[in-house]
Amino acid sequence: MADVMVQKTQEWLNNKYGDKPGFIPLDLSEEAGIVGRTGWTTIYALLGALQLELGLNETGTNFGPSTQRLFNEMFEDGIKPPIDETAVCGRYGGIYGIIQGALWCKGYPAVYGAITEHFDYATQVGVSWMRDDAGIDPGSTVTLNVMKALLSMNQYKLVWKGSSKIQTIQRTLNRNYEDYIGLSPCDGLYGREMNKAMIMVLQAIEGYTPEEANGNFGSGTKSRLHMLFIPHVVNLEATYLFRSALCCNGYDVELGYDWGNDVEIATFDFQSDMLLNTNGAADTDTWMALMISRGNIDRPSNGCDTRFEITSERLRILKNEGYSVVGRYLTGGSFKELRVGEAERITDGGMSLFPIFQESGANMAYFTPERGKTDALNSSKAARKLGMPKGTIIYFAVDTDPLDYQIEDYILPYFRALHESFDTDYKIGVYGTRNTCTQVCDNGYALTSFVSDMSYGFSGNMGFKIPENWNLDQFYELSTSETGWDFDLDKTTYSGRYPVVDNIQHRNYIQPAIPEVEPETPSILSFIEDIRTLETLYKQYYDANLASINGIPLLPNMLVIAMTNFLRSQEYNDWTWFFTTGSIIDSGFVSDIQENHSDIWEHMYNYIKENTEEFPRLDITDGETGLIDLSHFGATLEAYLGTGFFPSFWASWGGDLATGMSDTTINYKNRNEPDYEIYAGKTLQEIADATVGKATLLCNYTDFCTDFDAYKISCYIEEEIKNSTAETLNFHLLSDALMWYYSSGQYRNRFVWFFNELGLETQTTLGTLKAEIYERMNGAREKAILLPLKGNTPTQEVNAACCDSFANYIYKMINQ
């Protein structure tokens, strides 16, 4: 929201300094969007004005050494109010105006209505309030540090999501260590500037001078930590800082100067959370872990991650150095990603690995729901290709420092889509800052975290506890210049909370051969005219024999059922099919066709007759490579359109898969018997793979073509019926549907229609497809009726293996 006094400050700056060399006037057009709004543009303008007032010929955006020197020379004791507030301010009027404008930009009062260029009482009150909020003596003198604070974007009031306890720490440090840290923000947020200030305070306690303390946690700072081994060493200032650091890291302790039970318990908790030595004392590793997220980079590590291939020699080096776990990339190009055979080399060589998926870099625009869906598919494909076993956690990288609004707008929608589309054979992990990992996991989109604590300057690693569910903690990049090796790596602690990959399991699915279409096999198009004639004949039959009995005229949906009923009449006609379709065979109509329309009967008979070993029923073709069992088609279509008690997929792929389970049970049981030699020495899964889809067995390619065609045609018919009116009743609905489906090439997508039936997208992962099939086949009714009836009550192992084989068969047909 625009502020009128900020606007007046901006206008005053342009009016007073706009024509002076070195000053860049503010763009106060509507398009610029800064009118009345505090931001760096206005702060830089105020700073530039001060630099001109101090006598600098060139202005800049830093309150640098020259600006500080000139300020101290002009105001050795700071800027103080004149004795006579109403007197003309002379040469200092511009500086007083800068103070007034800066106060308004910071949310403190001066003289309302105008920049008066007086250091009057109202301006003095604003300075006093700001000093008080910063934690120092609330006088009205504008010292160098106060002026630097005014001409910054630092806040000294509690902001949204700020902590009053953190603000108390900030004010205390400013009050006690101003010579070291100046006036750091007092906004209640633990950020970069506060982190640097706390390190400078630690350096002050260690005995460094203000000139020596620089806020970098280097070897010198580390070397003096032994002097602060609290409680074995008594140091009140260090104790207050240590308590403050625990608070900043999310641990609930009171602020104070004594070492009590509360801080010892919190220290134990922190050390336990970070997998440090749990002694309850402020040792070197604990101090460093509290002050910088990466902690002590020299501490031992049991894990690492790298973009380099783990060759036999590199494996030997890693094991000799004590590493037991290594992270490698699933994708990313030939240099970065796991090579063929590398995963086996790692696990066979006595190490474990964890897979990382990263194709994002640091571009926030990458993280969209659409990309989440794509990455769900690509990651599982790569994992399966490389032999990652079921249950493997794949860590998806957010290799940047997103703020809360970016996590909300980009990261969470990406992970939500990833989670919804993810392969159920695998688990999701997240790599990122503490804040990123915590939010993704708290929303249920990832199981565990791989924390990028190495990026200790990231805001998402400051003021946040390490996630409770962390599994991997990356804390230092070890370069070739340090090791002399020919590869670099990141040191990573593995917590052991969640498993890593210790064995590789390649799923070598071999699809049963697809039968060739014999040249003499007729096309289904050659039967459509017969079906069209049958539709006409049934309408005549119904009107003559059934209309008066049923008391209703024939409707198109009734006519379609009559046709499917006729097609299944010779094979699918026992009580189970009554419960499946809701209809009994209309033997009267079948007899009428046999007796009075023998040409049609003879043309169709070999394709709808009862199937026996001596006289097998013949298949027809879709005109290309598909094979269709016309009688099976009729039964399946009727189940989809009918009112049967059983779920319609029982008459379709569900029933066929159940028979595949029965065949698999037989083949596995007899694998070492004569006539079953092809199954000898094979695992149950391999036998299921060879059984489900095999042309000569009960669950075969022809069944699949028939089932999926029937489903799609049922959808077409239902849509036509829904949209029909009394004037548009179609009594050739089945023949028209067949003509639409087989003359327009719809059958070429028959395996896609299966995904539609399950309510899945075509880009669904293999694991998700497998899980959906298994769930459908193992409902309460399926276990009670379908599997005993059609599947010969398969064992759980046979059941799962056949669902796996069926999913692989479908997936291969879609992706070949």
Image: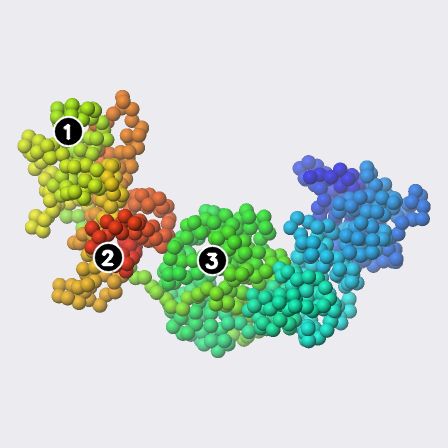
Location of residue 446 in the rendering, given as x and y in whole percent from the top left corner = 48, 56
Q: In the displayed orientation, state which residue is furthest to the left.
A: 595
Location of residue 451 in the rendering, given as x and y in whole percent from the top left corner = 54, 61
Along the horizontal axis of the image, is 687 left or right of 49? left
Depth check, front residue: 576 or 804? 576
What amino acid type should be assigned to the residue bearing mark 2?
A: Pro
Mark 3 secondary-structure assignment: loop
Please, which colouring scheme is shown? rainbow
**Classed neighbour count for the residue bearing mark 1: other residues with Cα under 10 Å, few (<14), some (14–19), many (≥20):** many
Query: Label for residue 794?
Result: 2
Location of residue 280 in the rendering, given as x and y in whole percent from the top left corner = 62, 71
- Residue pointed to by mark 1: 538
Residue at the (74%, 45%) spot, across then down: 42
Please name which of the two marks, 2 or 3, marks the residue nearer to the observer: 2
Depth check, front residue: 363 or 451? 451
First in sequence: mark 2 vs mark 1: 1
- Residue pointed to by mark 3: 447
Quadrant of the snapshot with the N terminus: top right
Q: Are marks 1 and 3 in contact (CB under 8 Å)?
A: no
What amino acid type should be assigned to the residue bearing mark 3?
A: Leu
First in sequence: mark 1 vs mark 3: 3
